[in-house]
Amino acid sequence: MGSSWRQLRAMLHKNWLLKIRHPLTTLAEILLPTIIMLSLIAVRSTVDTQIHPVQAYIRKGMFVDVGKSEVSPSFESLLQLLMARNEYLAFAPDTNQMRKMLDVLSLRYPLLQMVAKVFKDESGLETYIRSDLYGCQDHSRNLSNPKIRGAIVFHEHGPQIFDYSIRLNHTWAFSGFPDVKTIMDVNGPYLNDLELGVNIVPTLQYGSSGFLTLQQVMDILIICVAKEDVNYSSFNYQVHESSQSVVYPGRTTWSEFIPANIRIVPFPTREYTDDEFESLVKAVMGVLYLLGFLFPISRLISYFVFEKVC
């Protein structure tokens, strides 16, 4: 133990003599990191930190009317577009409840009977879309496999629980659609992302694809059915030709379940702190640390190597 302590004292004394014999080098080892740190402290003390309050965008020009605008076309317009492009809207699974729900919906939208395609189940829909003949239209070969623009897949038909999914064909959409960062995320990695300003891309995605319109129509149908507690096995219906509204005998009309206006606006920007210091130094912080600590660390490594050799 005593010999080890004497050896350590001798090494420290030797290194101290080396340091004082090279004052400029020793001074540079001390001053370079100090100057860098003091410069960062000076910059940090001169810039301000600003707290931005919550900013909402509920104002004129930000509203998008669901099913009534160019961004979000009506369901009738979507059906006409499907007719013009010879595309279909798929439904699954093929059950009595699904058929009768489509019958009720067809009373309000007669074109639906022309563009609706019902599949046995969701796997049948997947098989059809993945087949090599998907989208082939050749009357000479008796091939008729139209493209599917979208699909509504029910997992629960009621009467108390209705669970469905809306699936859309995005191969027609503009580049970068959909973007996982702009899809509603309630518990994923992008939940706490801060996005400044207004981003209209998500609204365009959900609106122009027809998602909002399909969701509105299906929700109204489900609310109507659930409100009336319809027994599908004994369901009867009639249509007022003047208003094209589905009427439940002795009760209410379809139009009573359609809100006058459904509008969406961008999510507000939550409160955040704007630190100007971080904005200023984020591009050069790595270089500053490199300049400040490269020389002292290189000298330290050379001392270790020198001691081992000696």
Image (cartoon, helix red, strand yellow):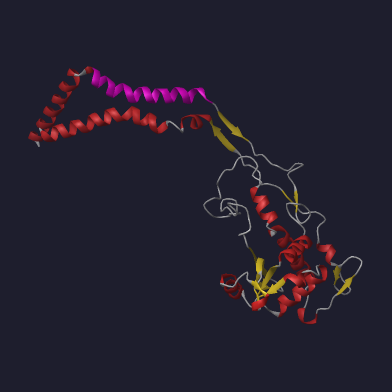
Magenta stretch mostly in which secondary structure?
Answer: helix
Question: Is 161 on the left or on the right of 177, as rendered?
Answer: right
**Residue nearer the viewer, 280 or 17:** 280
Question: Within the image, what quadrant is residue 166 found in?
Answer: bottom right
Q: Where, quadrant-wise, is the C terminus in this rendering?
A: top left
Farthest bottom residue?
233
| Span colored in magenta | 24-47
Q: Where, quadrant-wise, is the N terminus in this rendering?
A: top left
* Residue 32 painted magenta: yes
Question: Is 272 on the left or on the right of 14, as rendered?
Answer: right
Please state the horizontal and vertical placement of residue 302, each as a whole percent of the image. 20, 31
Question: Within the image, what quadrant is residue 262 found in?
Answer: bottom right
Please indicate, yes or no, whether residue 218 appears anywhere in the rendered image.
no
Vertical relation: 74 (above or below) 231 = above
Residue displayed at 82% across by 68% down: 108
Residue displayed at 76% across by 72% down: 114
Please state the horizontal and vertical placement of residue 34, each as a whole percent of the image. 35, 23
